Amino acid sequence: MNKITYFPGCSAHGTSEEFDHTLKLVMKTLDVQMEEIPDWNCCGATSAHVMTENLAIALPMRNLVLAEKLENKTMGIACASCYSRMKVTKKHLDENPNLAKKINSTIIDEGEYHGTIDVKSMLQYCFEEIGLETIKSKVTKSLAGLKVACYYGCLLTRPKDVTHFDSPEYPMSMDLLMEALGAKAVDFDYKTECCGASFSISNTEVVESLSGKILEVAKESGAHVIVVACPLCQSNLDMRQPDIEKHTKTKINIPVMYFTQLMALAFGFPEKELKLPKHIVPVEEALKNIGKIEPEPEKIKKTKKAVEAESEVV
Amino acid sequence: MARVGVFTCFCGANIADFIDVPQVVEATKKIKGVKVSAEYKYMCSDPGQQMIRDAIIQNRLTSVVVAACSPRMHEKTFRKALSDAGLNPYMLEVANIREHSSWVHQKDKKAATEKASDLIRMAVAKSIANEQLHEISVPVTKRALVIGGGIAGIQAALDIADARIPVTLIERSPSIGGRMAQLDETFPTLDCSQCILTPKMVDVASHPYIELIPYSEVIELDGYVGNYKAKIRKKASYVNFSTCTGCGACTQKCPVKVSNEFNMGIDKRKAIYTPFPQAVPNKPVIDAEHCTMLLKGKCGICAKVCEKGSIDFKMVDEVIEREVGAVVVATGYDLWDPKPYEEYGVGRYKDIITSLEFERMVSASGPTNGLPLRPSDGKVPKNVVFIKCIGSRDEAKGIEYCSKICCMYTAKHAILLHHKVHDSHAYIFYMDIRAAGKGYEEFVKRAQVETAATYLRGRVSKIYKKGDKLIVRGEDAQLGQVVEVVADLVVLATAVIPYKENPPLARLLGISYDKYGYMSEAHPKLRPVETAKAGIFLAGCTQAPKDIPDTVAQASACAAKVCGLFSGDTMKKDPMISTINTENCTGCQNCVTVCPYQAIVTEEIPLGHGSKEMRIVAKINEGVCQGCGSCVAICRSMSINLAGFTDPQIINEIVSI
């Protein structure tokens, strides 16, 4: 049994309950015990770091100090924004030894910061610490037939010098994870573009134009489902979809799911465990593609053979 | 009795503004041994030098101190003034009161003045112990080695050979011609690259003073300026060039196909091949990595069809030696791999190509017979987007510098595209247009006006696929808007980077290279052709990105330098080198280990006068020694003396402070 310190973030207990729930199912299957940080607080999100630098450090720092007390090697974070704030704070603290003392003496004091814990997103944890082979071994219902567009958003792999995970422009970890479940990950050029994030409330038009573009390209790529690892991305792409359709007068109708929902499905949990009614864009229709494998057209087979023949010595 | 003359320079305002020169001159007069102390606005000018010459004669000076700029600047100038006045030129000392005082202590005139006086006092003390020295003559081998057979190497070889100096030109690939042979037409005149290059290639092959060794590389260079010894490895071609007629039957029948590097992998070549039809020499070689006969011992068809029996599968690499007096390095350039541009889909989308791939396609002798085609479906593209500065001026992904040639060749590509596909349209995303050069700005105008290429100032942030088109999303900074261009083909102007084997070659030759891998010139402004190692010169992109006119100019400059070096039968060399006092030398050979120039060897001398027993002592090779002084510092028995920096000179300096 592996143990991990878990930081759910505020959305996991609200808008992204389906993420939190399926994550716990999946981790249990993978024999990972999640220890939620007692009395965790808000990471500060977008608001703190646009207002005061010290508060933007202090809030995640308190969580880091509390997390260290649980003495697990890794702290896993569900939300991409929380992950980013935690990572940035850790980098600042590790690089400036006096910063932690300054914060402790002025704002919050939960004890000393040691910098001993690894901070990872849950996607990164699955990919790096559990590994694709182990995940593959737990699959009881292959997702073959389902085409997915993996959407990482702007924070999971960026900035490169902070996250040190996957490519900042064209990451592949989630794609590989989906392929391990049997699904087909399509080429998706907009996998790291911004969805508009918290402008969802203050400037909805911006989100509609940015998320609209992501949805359009995902649709174009032929995917049945967009897979995400961030609650805000999910809500923007899912919840704003009907409005976007209204504006562009085109039917998009592409469901947006968490990678853990698909993992749970592949691990054999029944559909009702995925909490599908929480979705705005219905998911059920897309999931019917599972098991439907398109036969390879004759023409492609022929060219494939020709290419293979060419690469060999004549 | 010493009679020293001290001449302090104002250097315009460079020195006089920060150092009280009259005060320094007065202080200097009080130094023991100083006979004359004078000042002048520009000591290096003719009146300034005349002042020195007159003073030497009138006051019968025994040594001279010039307090001015760095000796690297004008030491030679003043030495000549001394010798013109009948004094040994090495009786000169330079006190560097500009770089070492006025420039670095601009905020404290008093301290700067005091420091200048100190520097002069030290120089006076040193000059009193100076000894008369005489230039050394070393013999010269009048043959040049040119490394690299691109346009730079070709031009340098031809110019040197035309002065009736023998040249050995070596080229790593089977044919000379280099990158220029891959080009279609050249900016800014659009003359055909092949038409201006191939005659020069033929000239090289037929020139009586040029020895062309293709398919070879330098593996060792020993010796020193005027007397280098180069070891050259001739790679096994498996074809006997002396009997081969170049008929091409072997190439036709060879069943093995491999990616054609000359055409940037767009088509295939055979395992026995000539790189391109106009190759010089026009003889095929066998690619040992792909030939099934060499790999598995099966096939041998080429040998069966060759009427002359020129195929020799048993051929091995051969090492030959050449004695040369000078070396021209012209290794050329590579192109940056745009793989890190993941947001463009490089590597995922076939219809994103590099400029050199585009160049090969529009080339009349290229793999598509001069028509640009989409690699994905072979269709002729209508909308082509060119993106400049891929890797250049990009600290995050590529390199910091500007590759210099991309603005111009992209303008050329826009024009060529229009010539080949009349109803096409070129879109060019750029950061700046750098078109400094004769006829260059006009040429860019031509692309903008005559061919109506759309120039968009801004970076591309994303390329994504829609159907069979590529959507190029970028910024038009002049409109302040995001724009999307629907493209059939995207061409990336990738950065020029140094030839990948430059660093090992530089180490082998004993010359320096910069952080990118370009060979370093001796001085960025005043000695752009020489390296820091005497007798080794640089031509073309081996030193920095350059276009063809600049490359040819630098290659000719190399030739002029080589001819200058070979103008006499012997060469003059600075006498400031080490000598060994064999009486004291214990033969420990520490100096042999520390010498960076391999200038110290050992010899055996009799143990005592008339003795038959021998002992080992160090010996300096005068031609190689550069006078760095490392051996002096390491010598435990104080048996090494460096002329111009003897112990008495140094001790005098220290005592005078």
Image: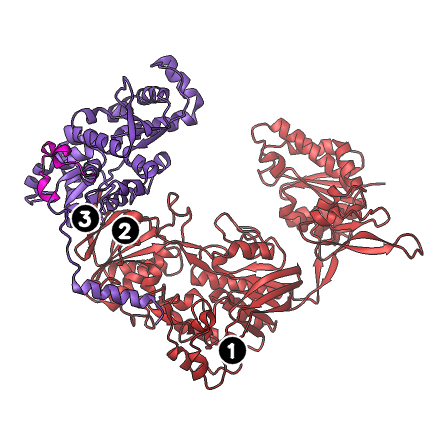
Chain colours: A purple, B red
Q: Is residue B610 left or right of residue B119?
A: right
Label 1 crowd (10 A; few <14 / some 14-19 / many >=20): some
The N terminus of chain A, quarter of image: top left
Q: Which chain carries label 2?
A: B
Is disc 3 placed on a helix, strand or loop? loop
- Which amino acid is tagged 2? Gly
Residue numbers of the magenta segment = A267-287
Which residue, given by chain and number where applicable, does mark 2 sit on? B345
- Whether residue A285 appears in magenta in the rendering, the answer is yes
- Give residue B104's quadrant in the image: top right
Which residue, given by chain and number where applicable, does mark 1 sit on? B312
Q: Distance between the residues labelled 1 and 2?
A: 46 Å
Which residue, given by chain and number where applicable, does mark 3 sit on? A144
Nearest the viewer among B59 and B488 is B488
- Which amino acid is tagged 1? Asp
Q: Is residue B655 left or right of residue B265?
A: right
* Residue at image coords 24%, 25%: A9
* Residue at image coords 47%, 56%: B500
- Which amino acid is tagged 3? Ala
Q: In this view, does B92 lie above or below A294?
A: above
